[in-house]
Image: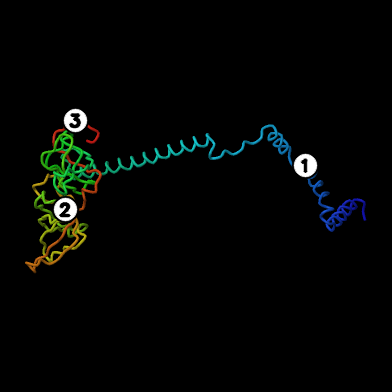
């Protein structure tokens, strides 16, 4: 054996002997040796890290009962709620812009102003089914003005004698509106074929009209306003949907369609009014 190979042979022999020794004997020796090897192999940064931690111990984690943590959580929740509120306001403003654009495209005359009206509690004397609005003549509301939702859905008309701060809304399907001339849209996407009808209220927010059994009227079809007694800007708006078509008892060759109002004004929080009167106050509701 060459002299250069002797250290390797000695190391291999020692490793073999240590490997067969009991753990209680070889364990302490191996731990000391591993510590020396680790110290030689680790860079100086490890030693500096130990010194830094000795001079400045790491700060303990703050618990949920710590005052600083409570304040941080409170600020986080506050700003998060403000962010959600601002986001909801942006969505609402975008909806109103879309509605205003749709109304102006349908009636570009500009002889009206859009007024947002909150729905309030109706007085018992105002009549069953009539809705009270928290907007009146101060913002240009006039009798007969049209109330709508989402730009193309009719909610009803303003009742007679609105006062300065409040008014009444007679919803679609209320007997107070009388008979309404309209058209059932047979073909909305194609040639736009329509069937003229005359609607009358039958209670429960529903209306009825006579139709031809061979006219193609089916449940689900839209009903659009076409009444010259209503303002020009309301013509063509959706006022209801056909929910039932049957045969008339008195006239077996004729049919009768039941129409449900597309908007239930009693369940609304706000409507938009096309105000035609002269406003005496300038408020944030008008635009």
Q: Which residue is mark 2?
A: 224
Instruction: In the rendered structure, find residue 69 and report the number of the disc placed on it.
Output: none
Q: Residue at x 9, y 67 (%)?
A: 249
User: Which badge, 1 or 2, is on the more N-terminal residue?
Assistant: 1
Query: Does residue 90 appear to the left or right of 50 in the view shown?
Result: left
Q: Quadrant of the N terminus?
A: bottom right
Q: Residue at x 24, y 49 (%)?
A: 267
User: Which badge, 3 or 1, is on the more N-terminal residue?
Assistant: 1
Q: Quadrant of the C terminus?
A: top left
User: Which badge, 3 or 2, is on the more N-terminal residue?
Assistant: 2
**Which of label 3 and label 2 is nearer to you?**
3
Q: Which residue is mark 1?
A: 39
Q: Nearer the viewer, residue 249 or 45?
A: 249
Q: Nearer the viewer, residue 206 or 252?
A: 206
Residue 87's spot in the image, x, y percent? Answer: 36, 41
Mark 1 surroundings within 10 Å by alpha-carbon count, few (fewer than 14), some (14 through 19), many (20 or more): few
User: Which colour assignment does the render follow?
Assistant: rainbow
Query: Does residue 266 appear to the left or right of 215 in the view shown?
Result: right
Residue 137's spot in the image, x, y percent? Answer: 15, 35
Q: Which residue is mark 3?
A: 281
Asked which quadrant contains residue 259, the reply is bottom left
- Kind of element beneath mark 3: loop
Taking the view exactly as shown, the residue that stands out farthest to the bottom is 252
């Amino acid at each position: 054996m060459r002299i250069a190979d002797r250290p390797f042979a000695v190391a291999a022999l020692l490793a073999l002997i240590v490997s067969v020794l009991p753990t209680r004997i070889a364990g302490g020796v191996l731990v000391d040796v591993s510590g020396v090897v680790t110290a030689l192999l680790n860079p100086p940064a490890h030693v500096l890290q130990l010194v830094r931690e000795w001079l400045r111990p790491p700060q303990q984690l703050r618990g949920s009962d710590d005052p600083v943590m409570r304040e941080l959580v409170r600020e986080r929740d506050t700003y998060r709620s403000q962010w959600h509120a601002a986001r909801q306001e942006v969505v609402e403003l975008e909806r109103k812009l879309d509605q205003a654009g749709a109304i102006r495209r349908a009636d570009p005359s500009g002889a009206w102003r859009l007024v947002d009206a909150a729905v309030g509690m109706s007085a018992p004397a105002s009549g069953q089914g009539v809705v009270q609005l928290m907007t009146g003549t101060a913002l240009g509301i006039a009798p007969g003005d049209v109330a709508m939702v989402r730009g193309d859905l009719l909610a009803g008309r303003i009742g007679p004698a609105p006062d300065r701060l409040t008014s009444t809304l007679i919803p679609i399907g209320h007997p107070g509106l009388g008979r309404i001339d309209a058209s059932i849209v047979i073909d909305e996407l194609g040639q736009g074929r329509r069937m003229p009808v005359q609607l009358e209220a039958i209670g429960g927010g529903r209306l009825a009209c006579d139709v031809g059994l061979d006219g193609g009227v089916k449940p689900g079809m839209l009903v659009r306003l076409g009444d010259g007694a209503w303002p020009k800007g309301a013509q063509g708006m959706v006022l209801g949907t056909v929910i039932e078509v049957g045969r008339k008892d008195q006239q077996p060759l004729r049919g009768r369609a039941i129409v449900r109002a597309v908007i239930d004004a009693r369940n609304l929080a706000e409507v938009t009014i096309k105000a035609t009167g002269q406003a005496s106050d300038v408020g944030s509701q008008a635009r």
